[in-house]
Image (spheres, helix red, strand yellow):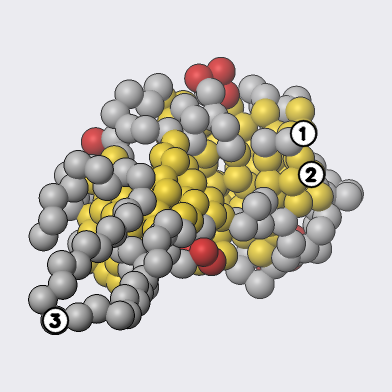
């Protein structure tokens, strides 16, 4: 049995393992008190490709011997008993029970809408419920219902990880700080701050990043000046910097 904890407004990604003999079987995810009586939420025979039905997405990873089920837009009413299942043609289906508990998200923002100027360094602070504070965290860019196309995680033995573009700092007290350097228009998009629990992932905070271009010219050329003249230069700046002091 898998015990999975999610938070309202977020999502969970559940890893359902199966025997190699079942690679070609259909896979499904259902809800009910028993496997034999549960009702299908998503079912597919498609392999190595995301399939989506309403709030559910399923990816059957045949080479890895598991399938992933993503359950989004969680509410308290989603708490209950579910099953990861393999469809058997001539014998009873194979079931793995999933005990899903949805908690009210009182610690953290469900969604962050941020805008950054091209060329800036963006800093994002993602909070996590205390029960997740010691677990590895990650930041990933969402590719619709196809999962994350770029993902960076903090290993159990490290609190800092990164490269020239993206860096993470997990203070192990419930806050993950994400820094994106040299922000560009291609960096805009939908992201998630999540925690890796091994058999499942809890996606806590959805981050929507948009890019904004500076309002102003980078170079001002002035000609026709004579020695001794007074020069008056007007330097416009973007909205949002009205209260920023000169450095």
The residue indicated by pointer 2 is: 43
Residue at figure coordinates x 36%, y 51% from the top left: 238
Q: Secondary structure at mark 1?
A: strand
Numbered disc total: 3
Q: Are marks 1 and 3 in contact (CB under 8 Å)?
A: no
Query: Mark 1: few, some, or many residues within 10 Å (few <14, many ≥20)?
Result: some
Q: Nearer the viewer, residue 164 or 149?
A: 164
* Mark 3 surroundings: few (<14), some (14-19) or many (≥20) residues within 10 A: few
Secondary structure under badge 3? loop
- Estimate the spatial distance between the alpha carbons at disc 3 and disc 2, rounded to whole Å: 80 Å
**Residue 31 in picture, x, y percent from top left:** 67, 28
Q: Position of residue 239 (x, y in %)?
A: 35, 45
Task: Say which mark, if any, is on residue 40.
Answer: 1
User: Of label 1 and label 3, which has the lower sequence position?
Assistant: 1
Quadrant in which the C terminus is drawn: bottom left
Q: Which residue is mark 3?
A: 227
């Amino acid at each position: 049995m898998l015990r999975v904890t999610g938070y309202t407004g977020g999502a969970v990604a559940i890893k359902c393992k199966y025997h190699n003999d079942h690679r070609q079987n259909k896979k499904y995810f259902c809800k009910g008190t028993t496997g034999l009586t549960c009702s299908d939420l998503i079912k597919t025979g498609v392999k190595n490709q995301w399939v989506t039905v309403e709030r559910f997405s399923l990816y059957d990873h045949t080479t890895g011997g598991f399938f992933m089920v993503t359950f989004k837009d969680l509410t308290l009413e989603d708490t209950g008993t579910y099953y990861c299942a393999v469809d058997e043609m001539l014998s009873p289906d194979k079931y793995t029970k999933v005990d899903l508990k949805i908690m009210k998200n009182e610690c953290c923002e469900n969604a962050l809408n941020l805008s950054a100027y091209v060329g800036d360094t963006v800093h994002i602070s993602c909070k996590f419920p205390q029960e997740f504070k010691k677990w590895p965290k990650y930041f990933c860019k969402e590719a619709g219902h196809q999962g994350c196309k770029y993902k960076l995680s903090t290993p159990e033995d490290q609190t800092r990880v990164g490269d020239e573009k993206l860096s993470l700092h997990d203070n192990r007290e419930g806050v993950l700080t994400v820094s994106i350097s040299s922000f560009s228009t291609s960096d805009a998009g939908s992201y998630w701050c999540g925690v890796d629990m091994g058999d499942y992932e809890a996606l806590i905070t959805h981050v929507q990043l948009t890019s904004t271009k500076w309002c102003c010219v980078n170079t001002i050329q002035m000609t026709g000046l004579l020695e001794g003249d007074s020069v008056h230069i007007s330097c416009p700046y973007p909205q949002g910097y009205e209260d920023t002091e000169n450095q």
